[in-house]
Image (cartoon, rainbow, N blue to C red):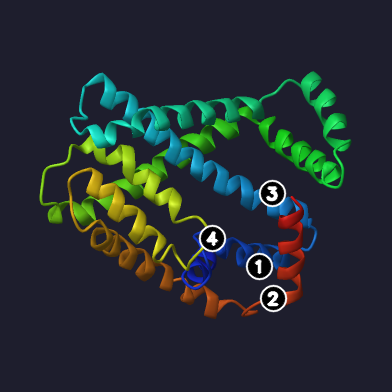
C-alpha cells in the first residue's frame, strides 16, 4: 500500500497526496476501519515524518553552534529558527502524553467550538489514544528520525560530488531538511518546481550554485523509486477501489 501511494505521489500534487490512494486500499482491505481512523492514521504518519526532519534540523543546528561549524552569516539565520522548531516538536510530543485529567477537561472545551468542535474533539481523543502508548510513540519518533536521516544522507551522497565549494557536513544537515519539508506541500507532483526553487535558494546561501540541478538529481532518483510502485499496483487483485471512497476520505480529511 505504501509503495502504491508512492507511485501515485509521482502524479498527484505534493509528497502526501498518494496517502489518499493508500487509505482507499486500506479501507478496501478492511471495511471496519472508520474514515476518521484512516485519515488520522495518515495524518499522524506524516506528522511523525515531519517530527523526524525537525529533530535532525534541531540537533544538527545545536551541534553547529557547539562546534562553530557555521562560518556563513547567511546560513546562521536558520539556526535559531531550526532550534525553535525543534523545541516546538518536543512540546508537541509532550502534549501527546498529556495526563488524563487534562484530557477530560480539554475535550468538552473543544466540543463547544462552533462547526468544527465535534471533529476536533474526536481527533483529540484518537490522538491521545495513540499517545497512551508512550513506548510506541517514542519508538516511532526514533524510527522516523533514523529514516529521515537516511533520506538527507542519500541527498548528500547523490549531490556532494557536484559541489563547487566545500560545505561542512553539519551545515548541510541544517538546511537540506527545510527543502525536503517544502516539497511535501501539495502544490505540484512530487514537489516538481517547488523543490527546485527552494533548493536553488538554500544552496546559494551556502555558496553553491546550481541548487535546482542538485535537487534534480535527487528528484530523478525518487521518481525512479516511486515508479517501481507500479509493480504492486498492477499485481493487486483490484486495480483501484471505488473513487467514491476517495471522495469520502477527502471530505473527512477536510473536516479534520
Who comes first in sequence, dot 3 or dot 2?
3
Who comes first in sequence, dot 1 or dot 2?
1
Q: Which residue is mark 2?
A: 241
Looking at the image, do the residues carrying marks 1 and 2 touch, with CB atoms under 8 Å apart?
yes
Which numbered mark, 3 or 2, is in the foreground of this view?
Answer: 3
Q: Which mark is residue 25?
A: 1
Mark 4: which secondary structure? loop
Q: In the rendered image, which quarter is residue 147 located in?
A: top left
The residue depicted at 26 percent of the width and 36 percent of the height is: 74
Looking at the image, do the residues carrying marks 4 and 3 touch, with CB atoms under 8 Å apart?
no
- Left or right relative to 244: residue 90: left
CA gap between label 1 and label 3 equals 15 Å
Badge 4, how many Cα within 10 Å: few under 14, some, many 20+? some
Mark 3: which secondary structure? helix
Which numbered mark, 4 or 3, is in the foreground of this view?
Answer: 4
Q: Which residue is mark 3?
A: 40
Residue 18 drawn at (x, y percent): 56, 65
Who comes first in sequence, dot 1 or dot 3?
1
Residue 165 drawn at (x, y percent): 10, 46
Residue 220 drawn at (x, y percent): 31, 68
The residue depicted at 88 percent of the width and 30 percent of the height is: 108
Looking at the image, do the residues carrying marks 1 and 3 touch, with CB atoms under 8 Å apart?
no
Q: Which residue is mark 4?
A: 186
Q: Is residue 219 above or below residue 77?
A: below
Q: In the rendered image, which quarter is residue 134 located in?
A: top right
CA gap between label 3 and label 2 equals 20 Å
Which numbered mark, 1 or 3, is in the foreground of this view?
Answer: 3
**Which one is nearer the viewer's eye here, 209 or 12?**
209
Looking at the image, do the residues carrying marks 2 and 4 touch, with CB atoms under 8 Å apart?
no
CA gap between label 2 and label 4 equals 23 Å
**Which one is nearer the viewer's eye here, 49 or 215?**
215
Amino acid at each position: 500500500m505504501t509503495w502504491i501511494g508512492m507511485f501515485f505521489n509521482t502524479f498527484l500534487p505534493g509528497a502526501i497526496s498518494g496517502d489518499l490512494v493508500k487509505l482507499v486500499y486500506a479501507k478496501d482491505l478492511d471495511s471496519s476501519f472508520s474514515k476518521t481512523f484512516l485519515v488520522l492514521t495518515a495524518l499522524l504518519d506524516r506528522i511523525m515524518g515531519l517530527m523526524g526532519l525537525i529533530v535532525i534540523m534541531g540537533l544538527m543546528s545545536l551541534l553547529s553552534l557547539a562546534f562553530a561549524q557555521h562560518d556563513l552569516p547567511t546560513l546562521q539565520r536558520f539556526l535559531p529558527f531550526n532550534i525553535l522548531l525543534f523545541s516546538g516538536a518536543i512540546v508537541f510530543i509532550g502534549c501527546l502524553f498529556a495526563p488524563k485529567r487534562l484530557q477530560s477537561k480539554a475535550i468538552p472545551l473543544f466540543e463547544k467550538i462552533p462547526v468544527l468542535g465535534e471533529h476536533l474533539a474526536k481527533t483529540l481523543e484518537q490522538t491521545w489514544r495513540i499517545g497512551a502508548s508512550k513506548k510506541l510513540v517514542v519508538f516511532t519518533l526514533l524510527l522516523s528520525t533514523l529514516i529521515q536521516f537516511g533520506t538527507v544522507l542519500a541527498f548528500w551522497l547523490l549531490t556532494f560530488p557536484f559541489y563547487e565549494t566545500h560545505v561542512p557536513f553539519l551545515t548541510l544537515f541544517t538546511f537540506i531538511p527545510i527543502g525536503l519539508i517544502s516539497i511535501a506541500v501539495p502544490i505540484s507532483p512530487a514537489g516538481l518546481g517547488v523543490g527546485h526553487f527552494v533548493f536553488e535558494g538554500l544552496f546559494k546561501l551556502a555558496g553553491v550554485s546550481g541548487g535546482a540541478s542538485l535537487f534534480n538529481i535527487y528528484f530523478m532518483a525518487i521518481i525512479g523509486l516511486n515508479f517501481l510502485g507500479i509493480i504492486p499496483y498492477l499485481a493487486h487483485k483490484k486495480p483501484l477501489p471505488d473513487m467514491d471512497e476517495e471522495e469520502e476520505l477527502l471530505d473527512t480529511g477536510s473536516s479534520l
